[in-house]
Image: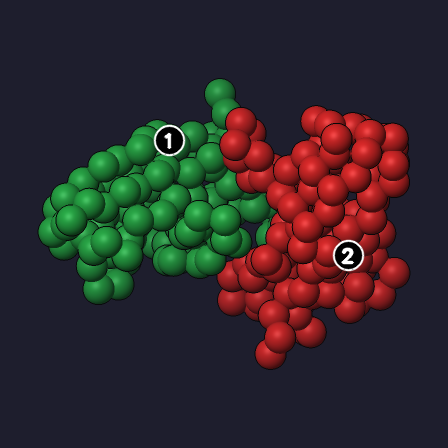
Chain colours: A red, B green
Amino acid sequence: DAGVIQSPRHEVTEMGQEVTLRCKPISGHDYLFWYRQTMMRGLELLIYFNNNVPIDDSGMPEDRFSAKMPNASFSTLKIQPSEPRDSAVYFCASLSLGGELFFGEGSRLTVL
Amino acid sequence: RKEVEQDPGPFNVPEGATVAFNCTYSNSASQSFFWYRQDCRKEPKLLMSVYSSGNEDGRFTAQLNRASQYISLLIRDSKLSDSATYLCVPQGGSQGNLIFGKGTKLSVKP
């Protein structure tokens, strides 16, 4: 199994630009999560989906953030417009039936 | 009170030492508990699941105290390769409610 696949691995952009992060979960996993990690705040849960339906988006910081899951094998997290304080590592994870979270390698975002 | 609290450390210990981390959680509905390990600049990976009062896996022992709402992780005979950040994750009332603590950093020195 290829595991959870995220892209891009690194992105550097300027303030005000749109950022789109992508995730392909492990096949057969019904839950998909988006987390953000910074030194100050640790690993924060942004949103999670069950069977492609957003269940809890209370962690999404602002309206500038949006996430979609159009099908079971693809999800996006979009930031528009981006700001320097959005700089972080964004992780996507999917949940096995046994309750284990499998993380992607993360997308490291730097907003200048 | 924060949902999940951990001592950030760092814990600096010599090889062979025994070290213990605690984690407290606020959601009394939590039924399942997990410890994840995260190496520097890597993604978190599952270390242990804790479903009852506790369990043991080699040098690692996890214990759960529901009354006091804390879980602990004990590492015996620590190795250099144990150096990492250890993240506590209680699962809240729903399966998707997986809130991570900020983690405890462990550094094992020769």
Label 2, residues with CA under 10 Å away: few <14, some 14-19, many ≥20: many
Judging by the rendered image, the residue that carries numbered circle 2 is A22
Identified at 19% across, 45% down, the residue is B109
Label 1, residues with CA under 10 Å away: few <14, some 14-19, many ≥20: some
The spot of residue B46 in percent (x, y) is 44, 58
Residue furthest out toward the top: B1
Closer to the camera in the image, B78 or B25: B78
Residue furthest out toward the bottom: A1
Q: Residue B110 carries which label?
A: none
The spot of residue A84 in percent (x, y) is 73, 28
B107 horizontally vs B89: left or right: left
Q: What residue type is labelled 1?
A: Pro
Judging by the rendered image, the residue that carries numbered circle 1 is B8
Instruction: Name the element at disc 2.
Output: strand
**Disc 2 sits on a residue from what chain?**
A
**Disc 1 sits on a residue from what chain?**
B
The spot of residue B24 in percent (x, y) is 38, 33
Q: Which amino acid does label 2 sit on?
A: Arg
Closer to the camera in the image, B102 or B92: B102
A63 horizontally vs B24: left or right: right
B78 relative to A1, above or below: above
Identified at 36% across, 37% down, the residue is B104
Instruction: Name the element at disc 1.
Output: loop
Identified at 64% across, 38% down, the residue is A88
Q: Say whether residue A98 is visible.
A: yes
Closer to the camera in the image, A19 or A94: A19
Pointer 2 and pointer 1: residues touching (CB < 8 Å)? no
